[in-house]
Image (cartoon, rainbow, N blue to C red):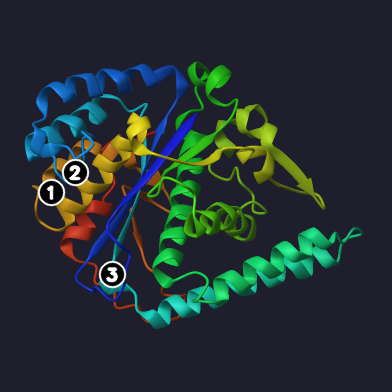
Amino acid sequence: MKIYIDESGDFNVEKSEYVSVIAGVIIPENKAYKLDALFNKLKRKVSLKEKDDNGEIKGSLLNPHNLKFVFEFLAKNLDFQIALVIFDHKSTTAKHILEHRMGQAERFQKGKDYYLTGPVKAKAVLDFFDEKKRWVERRDLISDVLYIQLALQVQIIEQALKKIFVHYYDDCYRRLCFEKFTFIIDRKNKKIKKPEKYISELIYGFLETQWSSKEPYIMIDKLGKNEHPMTKFDVNKDGKIGTDLKKLFGEGLKFEDSKNHKGLQLADIIASGVRRIVLGEIDRNIFNLIRKNSAFFERKWRAVTLATFCLKGNKCPKERTELYKFLEKSPEENPV
């Protein structure tokens, strides 16, 4: 199963009027042919103004009619599940980011302390915790902009995995789609440079310290945990079942050029389209078309994650505007 991730916006909190969006689109192998059919039709519809200098269709340039055409395709094909995080820059200050970074550094330290209680203490693992802790603590190594982007990409990956647990439970997906997972992130440079190096190494560390040791199947107990295809990624740590992220990801975190992946181009169209809706450039009711594709359960059914870096107990300046309430609203019908 492939999960394509792209973003729209620059994640700079100093630009308080900005909004940034990250989108992930999940494409099971046995439905990938539909993606080719979509782009074959879309290429015949778009004008030169809706492409970049390399001839690639860009979501930020699509006219509203063609954007609606893509969203209508998604509405008819719920096999294409969407993970969405909207980051309203007004919701976060530089102080919030600093507190969040220190909190993540503390989690890395706790991970190291927990590891030190075990029988084997490999230097490579200890160095892993120390290095990642240093990375998140120092802005000269990882800027706030890159840190925000990384943290939100982790949210997309976590949300995508939870959706996979539930939405693709049916037998028609099991044999092929659960063999491996490949997360493909849009590469902004021809060669992987420091930012992508930090992201590729830190994403695993973020997930390890806040997700993999938790009970991963709480959402699917009623579906029959012991029969779920994701159980092959289980690991037993001190009697507690968690998810073996090394086994789950394997070689499955890649940075690729969007011109080579229609899935990345689709993620770009979704992220840019949602951002344009938030900014008032596109009729917001178009979002209703993908509400079922993006719906996920987190205490209640929601269609998007509205991201904030305010820690619990702190007052957050985020305003729950009528627009964001509209975007987060769950579908009228049960999406599972």
* Residue indicated by mark 3: 89
Across and down, in percent, residue 34 comes to 32, 19
Q: Quadrant of residue 66?
A: top left
Q: Is residue 284 left or right of residue 31?
A: left
Q: CA distance from mark 2 to mark 1?
A: 6 Å
Say which residue appears at 16% left-offset and 62% top-offset: 322
* Residue indicated by mark 2: 287
Type of the residue with mark 1: Arg
| Whether residue 213 is situated above or below residue 24 in the rendered picture | below
First in sequence: mark 1 or mark 3?
A: 3
Say which residue appears at 59% left-offset and 38% top-offset: 221
* Residue indicated by mark 1: 284
| Between 80 and 185, the one nearer to me in the picture | 185
Type of the residue with mark 2: Phe
Disc 2 to disc 1: CB gap under 8 Å: yes
First in sequence: mark 2 or mark 3?
A: 3
Q: Quadrant of residue 17?
A: bottom left
Q: CA distance from mark 2 to mark 3?
A: 21 Å
| Whether residue 124 is situated above or below residue 142 in the rendered picture | above
| Secondary structure type for disc 3 | helix
Across and down, in percent, residue 37 comes to 26, 17
Say which residue appears at 50% left-offset and 43% top-offset: 162
